[in-house]
Amino acid sequence: MIKGFGGIFWRTNNLEAVKKWYSDVLKLEIGNWNGTVIKPQSGNETIFSFFAEDDSYFPTDQQVMLNFQVYDLNETIQHFETIGVPLAKEQESSEFGKFVWIKDPDGRLIELWEK
């Protein structure tokens, strides 16, 4: 029944700053309609998962966390270093892949994942 996610939407008080940040930092081409379309490719997965209110995997005051799958996490980290975006948490590896975290201008923790 479910084909995939149709979108992720949220409000911000810093629309232009947030659009610029996502464009510069995550290389998302944000259109003049304030969004972008990400078209999955082979090997790209979208995980839909629930967490208990007190789970410490991401901040408990943040109701939703974005996770972007990347081709090369080391290249992504180098990009962040070049443009001065600090990691919110250092790289971790598990049987699920490699992960790092950064924060957007509104303070949302964002996870980057290489499978």
Image (cartoon, rainbow, N blue to C red):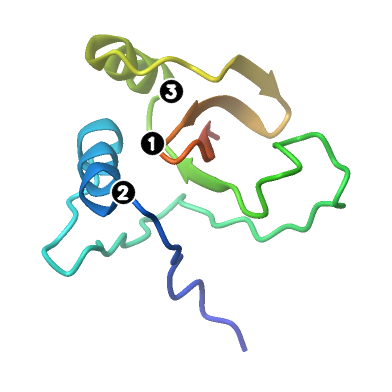
**Which residue is labeled 2 in the image?**
14
* Amino acid type assigned to the residue bearing label 2 in the image: Asn
Per the image, label 1 sits on a secondary structure element best described as: loop
Q: Residue at x 66, y 19 (%)?
A: 93
Q: Nearer the viewer, residue 41 or 4?
A: 4
Q: CA distance from mark 1 to mark 3?
A: 21 Å
- Label 1 or label 3, whichever lies nearer to me, is 1
Q: Residues within 10 Å of mark 2 (few under 14, many from 20)?
A: few
Relative horizontal placement of residue 55, taking residue 105 as reference (left or right): right
- Label 1 or label 2, whichever lies nearer to me, is 2
Q: Nearer the viewer, residue 69 or 95?
A: 69
Q: Quadrant of the C terminus?
A: top right
Q: Locate residue 43, reporting x and y percent.
A: 46, 50
Of mark 3 and mark 2, the one earlier in the sequence is 2
Q: Locate residue 81, reporting x and y percent.
A: 32, 10
**Which residue is labeled 3 in the image?**
73
* Amino acid type assigned to the residue bearing label 1 in the image: Pro
Q: CA distance from mark 1 to mark 2?
A: 8 Å
